[in-house]
Amino acid sequence: MNFLLHIIAIIAIGLPQVLGYNVIFGKGKIFHFGPIGVSLMAAYATFLTITNGGSYLLGITLGAGCALLISLLFAWLSFRLEADALGILSIAVHLTFLTVVLNSTQVTRGALGIPRIPRLPFLSSLSSFATIATVIAILWLAILYMIDTGPFGRKLQALAEHEWHAKSLGVDREHTHIAAFLLGGIGAAISSILMPQYLLLLHPNDYTFPFLIILVMIVVAGKPGSILGVTLSAILLTLLKEGLRFLPLPTTMIGPIRLLLFGVILLLAVYVRRDSLFPQQRKI
C-alpha cells in the first residue's frame, strides 16, 4: 500500500512541472531546455528561507517569485535568439544555476544538500501527501486544459505553426510567449515546493541534466501539446522508472540502465513525433 501511495505522490508532484513545460515546449514549439533550472532556484529560494527561520508563507512566496522572474528571463531571451540558440543558452543557464548552488557551500551546503526539510502540518503522512498532491495536480490539469482549449491555446498554436501569418492576424507574440513561460514557471514552482518536502531533502543531484532528459522525453512521448497525452505519458513512464527498482541488479547499475533506456525511448519518441515537434509551416 505504501509503495502505491509513493507512486501516486511522485506522479502527482511531477505533473505540474511536466504540464507547464508542455505549454512551452509542446504547444508553443519553443526550444526551451531550462525548466529544471527554474525548479532548482525556486526550491532553494523556498527552503533556504524556511530553514533559516523564515515562515512557510514567505518561503513559498520567494520561491514562486524566483520561478516567475527566471521564467521572464527565458521569455526575454526567446525574443532575441533563434530557436537553436535559445535551446543551447537555456541549457547553459540551467548548468550555471547548478554550478552556483554546488559552489556556494556556506549558503547551500553544496553537494551535501539541505537535509531535514520540514513539511507543512497537513502533509505529515504519506496518505495525506499523496491525496493533496493529487488534488493539486488535477486542479492544475483542469486549469491548463481550459487555457489550452481557449483563445490562448489557439494563439500559441498559431505562432508555432506559422509565426508570420499569426502576427498578421493580430496575435501578439511577446505577450503570448510571456504567458506560456509564466505558466511553465508556476508549474515548476508547484513541483519544486512539494518534492523536497516529500523527500525531506533538497539535493542538487535532483536537478541535473538527466532529469531534463526525462522531462523532455515525457512531453515528446505523450504527443507534444496534448495535455491528456502528456499526462498519460507521465504516469506510464513514472511507473517504468520506479518499476526498474525491482530488477535483480546491483543498485549501482539501475541508474545507468534507466538513463540508457530513457535515452532510447526519447530517440524513438522524437522519430515517431517528428511531425509534431517540427511541424511544416502552413502555406496560404
Image: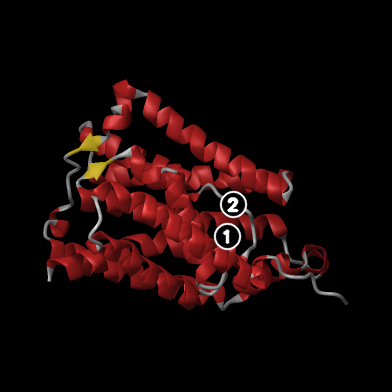
Q: Is residue 100 left or right of residue 178?
A: left
Q: Mark 1: which amino acid?
A: Ile
> On screen, 97 above or below 176?
above
> Which residue is labeled 2 in the image?
32
Determine contact: label 2, label 1, CB under 8 Å: yes
**Is disc 2 placed on a helix, strand or loop?**
loop
Q: Quadrant of residue 61?
A: top left
Write the residue at 18% across / 52% down: 120
Write the residue at 17% across / 44% down: 118
- For residue 76, say whether it is visible: no
> Which residue is labeled 1 in the image?
24
Write the residue at 37% across / 24% down: 104
How would you rate the neighbour count of disc 1 (Cα within 10 Å): few for under 14, some for 14-19, many for 20 or more? many
Q: Nearer the viewer, residue 75 or 27?
A: 27
**Is disc 1 placed on a helix, strand or loop?**
helix
Q: Is residue 267 left or right of residue 283?
A: left
Q: Nearer the viewer, residue 282 or 237?
A: 237
Q: Is residue 76 left or right of residue 13?
A: right
In whole angstroms, how far apart are the C-alphas of marks 2 and 1? 7 Å
How would you rate the neighbour count of disc 2 (Cα within 10 Å): few for under 14, some for 14-19, many for 20 or more? many
Q: Nearer the viewer, residue 215 or 176?
A: 215
Residue 238 position within the rendered picture, expressed as x and y whole percent measured from the top left? 35, 65
